[in-house]
Image: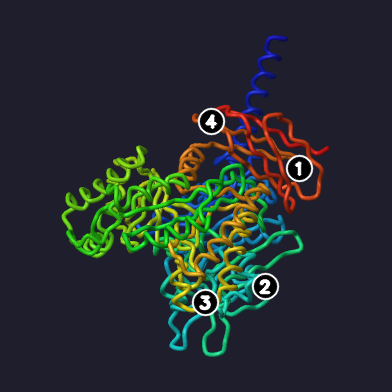
């Protein structure tokens, strides 16, 4: 009888365990609940190759910026009991197009996440505008949550996007949204090198009760483009009335990167790996020497002390004897003892010598697309070999004459050992791997976008454009401060010049950069040194767990963790970092923890005192 009781008890226990397991499975079939810090990258549908490209753009930026994320499908959202979603995901990002189709249930879950659970969500362009069957919704399901009526019909009743500009309320608002100094014109409109104001796709929209940071202006009316609606719960609904991925795919990386960074850092307070060495801002000064026309200017600059080994430059040279056509004898001629060689031997003391195109600057710039690839590659090899013959050092940096840089060149550059290059696209943004729709640049080469001042990039262009000297100096100081405060890497470029305008601007740049470097706020280096760090940074795995406001951080990198920095938000609480091989600093409630030794794996605990 006793044996039977034990059997019945065991059977009952087993049945109870099965019931518990089934309940657990039904509620948590997608992932075991834990306190991992993660961003949910929401994917409603992936129907086309373009949809996949949109998702790839968001993933790329999140990876390059060091934010922990996971791709999430709407069905997963229904697997959590009320209130649990915020504990699983600390922010939600809903990209355009792939979230245009949405059910009422999904929209309600997201709304509750913001209104009731205090969660932050970023929406792009057209969320919840299409019903599950493919028909246009009478009104977007999330309009009330966003505080914006968007995707409104035109006068003819048709719903479609239109092409318009993007104006920030003022310069300070643009700065608050991570827009690099110089990218806004005199009207505070988002602009770019050579073209001025940029056009974007917007839906027709009307602000109801959101805060408007940026807008378009049409016939005296304002169309909201970047808005925020905050809730008493602590949640926020951020809306970008622009297809962010499309910007990246059209060689404008800055806007999507800045919107994502601002949302995740300022609104969601998401921890991240900082993508610059020692967690400091980075600054690159890139000098292009295209021909023999610059010998006089270089001599004057050297005599005036405008080169400093404590602020090493990226110095890129077109090395051949010709410029416009083979045989014109107007080039730099790096190997000549009577022309380029003596100057090059001095210049190599002030930075990294890189290759500027293929042998003859203007010939290469204007004819690259017409040359047989074998010939183009030969000219690239000639240029690098000539520089290496003088310096005795491998060329690992590159810049394209005239900005003419088809992606097929990258395969050759990578084969030659190059790790970084100047890039005329994505202006004003961070080093990245460019995308132009189906074309994706090499992941082993880092493109360093130029940072323009409005429609100008080089100092000579600013001088020819009659930009006031004091305005240029202020832009330079603002740009270096921006790099330090945002902890991002930025690059400016110009050519040698002995005009007072250019030399004074360079002197301002040098003095400001050296002062901020001395204060430990930025690091001034050639692009190749940053690229070496970024290649190692990209291999870093980071897992962050949070309980209340304490953190447990696990870092791992097979090439070592030295100079890798993780940032966690601690607010005004006093914290202690349980590790001796790190250095820390606090700014605006963020704790920056930098590894000073070089282990392959490290666990760091951050606890309240």
Q: Which residue matches tag 1?
A: 548
Q: Is residue 216 left or right of residue 231?
A: left
| Residue 99 visible | no
245 vs 364, nearest the viewer:
364
Q: Which residue is mark 3?
A: 467
Q: Secondary structure at mark 4?
A: loop
Circle number at residue 211: 2
| Pointer 3 or 1: first along the chain | 3
Tell me the quarter of the picture where residue 473 sits. Answer: bottom right
Whether residues under marks 3 and 1 lie with C-beta atoms below 8 angstroms apart, the answer is: no
In the figure, 260 relative to 66: above or below?
below
CA–CA distance between discs 1 and 2?
A: 30 Å
Q: Quadrant of the C terminus?
A: top right
Residue position for label 4 = 560
Which x, y percent locates residue 440? 35, 53
Disc 3 vs disc 2: which is toward the camera?
Answer: 3
Nearer the observer: mark 2 or 4; the answer is 4
Among numbered discs 1 and 4, the one appearing first in the sequence? 1
Q: Residue at left 29%, top 51%?
A: 338
Find the distance from the CA under tag 1 to the CA under tag 4.
30 Å
Residue 526, percent across and down? Answer: 48, 48
Instruction: Tell us which disc is closer to us: 1 or 4.
Output: 4
SS label for mark 2: strand
Of the two numbered discs 2 and 4 on the same chain, state the one appearing first in sequence.
2
Q: Pick the quarter of the image with the N terminus.
A: top right
In screen coordinates, is 349 left or right of 562?
A: left
C-alpha gap between disc 3 and disc 2 = 34 Å
Secondary element at tag 1: loop
Determine which quarter of the picture holds residue 175.
bottom right
| Spatial CA span between label 4 and label 3 | 46 Å
């Amino acid at each position: 009888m006793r044996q039977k009781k034990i059997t019945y008890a065991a059977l009952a226990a087993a049945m109870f365990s099965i019931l518990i397991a089934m309940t657990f499975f039904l509620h948590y079939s997608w992932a075991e609940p834990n306190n991992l810090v993660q961003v949910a990258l929401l994917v409603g549908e992936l129907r086309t190759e373009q949809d996949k490209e949109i998702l790839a753009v968001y993933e790329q930026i999140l990876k390059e910026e060091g934010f922990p994320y996971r791709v999430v499908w709407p069905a997963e959202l229904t697997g959590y009991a009320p209130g649990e979603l915020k504990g699983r995901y600390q922010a939600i990002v809903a990209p355009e197009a792939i979230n245009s189709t949405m059910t009422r249930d999904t929209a309600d879950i997201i709304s509750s996440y913001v209104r009731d659970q205090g969660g932050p969500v970023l929406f792009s362009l057209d969320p919840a505008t299409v019903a599950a069957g493919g028909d246009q919704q009478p009104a977007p399901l999330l309009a009330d949550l966003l505080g914006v009526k968007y995707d409104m019909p035109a006068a003819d009743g048709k719903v479609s996007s239109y092409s318009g500009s993007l104006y920030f309320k003022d310069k300070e608002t643009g700065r608050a949204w991570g827009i690099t100094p110089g990218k806004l014109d005199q009207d505070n409109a988002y602009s770019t090198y050579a073209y001025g104001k940029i056009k974007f796709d917007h839906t027709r929209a009307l602000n109801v009760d959101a805060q408007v940071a940026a807008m378009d202006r049409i016939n005296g009316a304002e169309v909201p483009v970047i808005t925020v609606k905050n809730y008493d719960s602590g949640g926020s609904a951020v809306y970008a009335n622009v297809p962010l991925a499309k910007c990246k795919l059209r060689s404008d990386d800055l806007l999507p990167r800045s919107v994502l960074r601002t949302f995740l850092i300022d609104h969601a307070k998401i921890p991240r790996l900082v993508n610059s060495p020692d967690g400091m801002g980075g600054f690159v000064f890139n000098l292009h020497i295209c021909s023999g026309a610059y010998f006089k200017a270089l001599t004057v600059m050297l005599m005036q002390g405008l080169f400093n080994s404590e602020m090493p430059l990226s110095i890129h040279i077109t090395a051949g004897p010709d410029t416009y056509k083979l045989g014109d004898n107007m080039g730099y001629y790096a190997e000549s003892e009577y022309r380029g060689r003596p100057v090059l031997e001095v210049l190599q003391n002030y930075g990294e010598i890189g290759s500027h195109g293929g042998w003859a600057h203007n010939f290469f710039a204007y004819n690259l697309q017409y040359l047989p690839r074998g010939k183009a590659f030969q000219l690239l090899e000639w240029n690098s070999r000539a520089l290496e013959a003088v310096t005795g050092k491998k060329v690992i940096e590159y810049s394209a004459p005239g900005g003419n840089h088809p992606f097929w060149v990258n395969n050759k550059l990578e084969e030659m050992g190059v790790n970084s290059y100047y890039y005329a696209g994505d202006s004003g943004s961070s080093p990245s791997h460019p995308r132009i729709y189906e074309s994706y640049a090499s992941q082993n080469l880092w493109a360093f976008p130029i940072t323009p001042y409005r429609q100008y990039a080089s100092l000579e262009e600013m001088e020819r454009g009659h930009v006031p000297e004091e305005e240029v100096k202020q832009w330079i100081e603002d740009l270096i401060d921006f790099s330090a405060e945002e902890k991002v890497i930025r690059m400016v470029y110009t050519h040698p010049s002995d005009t007072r305008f250019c030399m004074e601007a360079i002197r301002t740049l040098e003095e400001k950069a050296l002062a901020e470097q001395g204060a430990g706020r930025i690091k001034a280096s050639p692009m190749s040194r940053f690229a070496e760090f970024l290649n190692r940074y990209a291999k870093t795995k980071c897992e962050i767990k949070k309980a209340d406001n304490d953190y447990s951080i696990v870092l791992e990198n097979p090439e070592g963790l030295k100079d890798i920095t993780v940032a966690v938000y601690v607010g005004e609480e006093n914290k202690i970092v349980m590790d001796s091989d790190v250095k820390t600093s606090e700014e605006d409630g963020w704790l920056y923890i930098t590894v000073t030794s070089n282990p392959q794996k490290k666990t760091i605990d951050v606890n309240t005192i």
